[in-house]
Image (tube, rainbow, N blue to C red):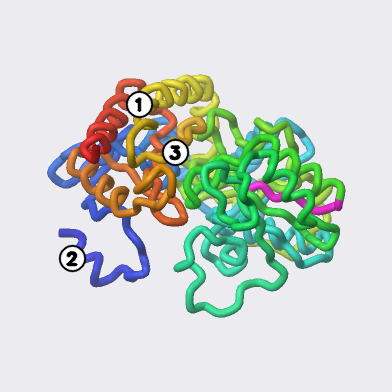
Amino acid sequence: MLKQRADKVLCSVLSRFHELDIKSGQGCYLYNYDDVAFLDFGSGIAVTSTGHCHPEVVEAVQEQVGTLIHPCIAVGNTEVVVDCAEKLVSLMQSDDYSVFFEQSGAGAVEAALKLAKFVTKRHQVLAFEGGFHGRSMGALSVTTSKKAYRDNIGPMLDGVSFFPYPNTYRSSHESITDISVTAYIEKLKQSGAIHSGLAAVIIEPILGEGGYVAAPIEFLQCVADLCKQHNVLLIIDEVQSGIGRTGSWFQFQKAGIFPDIVVMAKGLGSGMPIAACVGKTEIMNQWSKGSHGGTYGANPVTCAAASATIDIISKQLSAISALSDYASHVLEPLRLHPYIGDIRIEGLMIGIECVKDHSTKEPYSDMVADILKKCLDRQLIVLSCGVHSNVIRLAPPLIVTKEELTTGLQTLMEIINDYD
């Protein structure tokens, strides 16, 4: 088995949802070495947005590999890179943005934090409890989704503070007893958490690793307004929610705001390692020449994949919203289940929170771990998330058909209903 070989040579720090031996992938399916098909509702953690090996992505990558793999952006421009950047700017619904390419979400967050500090000449940053922004040191300093990420590595970056994320199902902060949206907004305003001493506020419009919890639109608008009042840069982390995952190109667009900086990755390249820090041009242009950079950023091959991905998803956006409504309808009966505390759906980001008791909301992490195994036994791949790992995470490819979605949801519901 591959596991035995992998255990000898791959670092054990890697955590696993499953231990499949994977041979290939096509569309919404992964295949093992016995050619058993697994319906993939994890998408490589919301990465393979166009499914596995989408023919248009494969064609774009193969053509680019045969033409030019890596000249380094420091040497010269390539049409495929500029084309990809132009498409990303167009998705922002404003021409006042420019792009810095990275290889990972964490790298894009590092760039965003560095940019904010450079431009404002301040070092304090406000983040939100339960947020995940990456595991490199800067990104980790604004991450609290899992305690284990920060254990035994010493001090984080100075000047980082946290405010409770607006989770209207469960508050993470004792001082918030009324967890209505209005209460969160008023608490934020009165707390003085956003002040003129900050370089930036960084927030996920939907918590990814933190449990697929969407911040209310009014809360995002309030954060944007407070940042503007205090001349603080607003960084929106759309690494997991961006590029069509929620039925819009970006979740922040539902709030009608224009962030100073947006970071994106995961679904951008359909599995190719590409990310971007996209900021307002007036801010990006304040970075002094050479003060930031990277060898592999703006790679022609990954940009070709991203460009093809954008083209594919642009034809799919309306279908994503329709599939989301359908999923909500199918899953509605689960809301009455004794161990299902909350069901959260934004586009094709679906989180099902499991609790031992509706009144106490005690996390039922063991149930989720067991469900993941039972789903795999029935050739369905689902993941988990949440601060307590008690949320079933569904992130199917954005090209999933209604029939495939039905199959996956019905399988999951049958397994969950066995817990009655």
Q: Are marks 3 and 2 in contact (CB under 8 Å)?
A: no
Could you tell whether 24 is left or right of 60 in the image?
Answer: left
Looking at the image, is mark 1 or mark 3 earlier in the sequence? 1
x, y percentage for residue 173?
Answer: 60, 56
Magenta stretch: dominant SS?
strand
> Callout 1, which amino acid?
Pro
Disc 2: which residue = 4
x, y percentage for residue 346?
Answer: 51, 33
Could you tell whether 190 is left or right of 271 in the image?
Answer: right
What residue appears at the point 63 percent right and 45 percent down from the top-left corner? Answer: 178
Question: Which type of secondary structure does the marked residue at label 1 adopt?
Answer: helix
Question: Which type of secondary structure does the marked residue at label 3 adopt?
Answer: strand
> Callout 3, which amino acid?
Asp
Question: Image quadrant for the C terminus?
Answer: top left
**Marks 3 and 2, Cα distance to the nearest angstrom?**
38 Å
Could you tell whether 22 is left or right of 55 in the image?
Answer: left
Q: Give the range drawn in magenta.
A: 230-237
Disc 1: which residue = 333
What residue appears at the point 29 percent right and 54 percent down from the top-left corner? Answer: 366
x, y percentage for residue 327?
Answer: 40, 26
